[in-house]
Amino acid sequence: MRKIYIIIISIVLLASTACELKLKQYGDDSRQTLVEVQRYDRLQSRYLTTGDFSALQQMNIEYAMETRTLIEDVLKIGEVNDPEINSKFLSFYQDTTLQAIIAEAEAQYANMSDINKQMSDAFKRLQKMIPGLNIPVVYSQIGALDQSVIIGNNSIGISLDKYLGEDFAVYRRFYSEHQRSQMTRSYIVPDCLSFYLLSQFPLNNYEAASQYERDMHIGKIMWVVNKAMKKEVFATKFTDIAANEMEKSSGKSIADMLKK
């Protein structure tokens, strides 16, 4: 009986170790966080650089919505149910610039535990500021230098290709120095919060609103993001005006002020 007991304990320990190794291989941190970025980009990279069909299957089964959004809305290369879409998708990314972007994104974002922590801390503060705010699913992908953040179905998609650093050589061909200064890792979380809050609190009658009203609404959103980040990420004339207006309206909730 003693030998059997020892064998059982050994099996449990081995299983535990294997599980831990798997977590370390596929996740950045085994600790639980409020928000953890789903690494869709890793499957995408595997398929687009090696043609690994199993990666494509996982993309289509486990990330069906994300794959549809990427193909139809971001890349706009066709419909996901097109019989030829897989080859179109693979062919699209064979461009040398996009292959360089994939390699750089996977190198820079091998670990995203810092993003998970920042995102979790920021959403915890947002939930205190705006009770009842839903926590979205967050995933990472590699686009084609189009959109930086994609919002839909209570999800946030981070296009890592837009956050490779102001010194990334490819950026110099397409973006100004000011634009490049905001295409860094440090802007991922603030950008995600900004776009998500805009989706939750859109400006009423946007089409009819004046440019000042639009700028003021963005200023309010940015002010909330600064509070959630506990630092002044965004500093504009309109964030200053919004700060004064929000602080004077202490009797109103932040949600009410964003809906105004």
Image (spheres, rainbow, N blue to C red):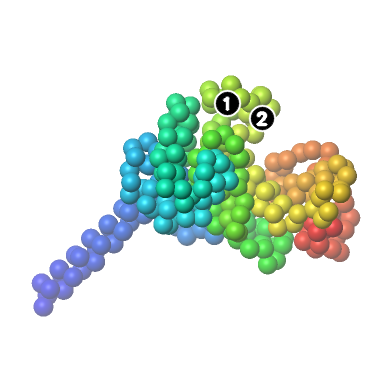
Spot the residue most to the bottom. 1
In the rendered structure, are the residues bearing label 1 and label 2 in contact, judged by CB atoms less than 8 Å apart? Answer: yes
The answer to which of marks 1 and 2 sits earlier in the sequence is: 1
Horizontal side, residue 110 vs residue 212: left or right: left
Quadrant hosting residue 3: bottom left
- Report, in whole angstroms, how far the alpha carbon at label 1 lies from the one at label 2: 9 Å
Q: Nearer the viewer, residue 23 or 137?
A: 137
Picture coordinates of residue 95, whole percent (x, y): 45, 28
Callout 2 amino acid: Gln
Q: Element under label 1? A: helix
127 on left or right of 203: left
* Crowd rating for badge 2 (residues with CA inside 10 Å; few <14, some 14–19, many 20+): few
Query: Residue beneath label 1, please?
Result: 171
Q: Quadrant of the C terminus?
A: bottom right
Picture quarter containing residue 12?
bottom left
Viewer-nearest residue: 191 or 5 = 191
Q: Is residue 158 visible?
A: no
Give the number of marks.
2
Q: Position of residue 203 (x, y in %)?
A: 80, 53
Look at the picture and state if 48 lies above or below 96.
Answer: below
Q: Residue at x 43, y 57 (%)?
A: 62
Marking on residue 179: 2
Task: Report the residue at 56% width, 31% height from top.
Answer: 165
- Which quadrant of the figure contains the N terminus? bottom left
Residue 183 % position (x, y) = 61, 34
User: Residue 210: which quarter of the image?
Assistant: top right
- Whether residue 220 is visible here, answered yes or no, is yes
Crowding at dot 1, Cα within 10 Å, few <14 / some 14-19 / many 20+, comes out as some
From what the image shows, is residue 142 above or below residue 245?
Answer: above
Decide: is 19 above or below 80. below
Q: Secondary structure at mark 2?
A: helix
Q: Amino acid at mark 1?
A: Tyr
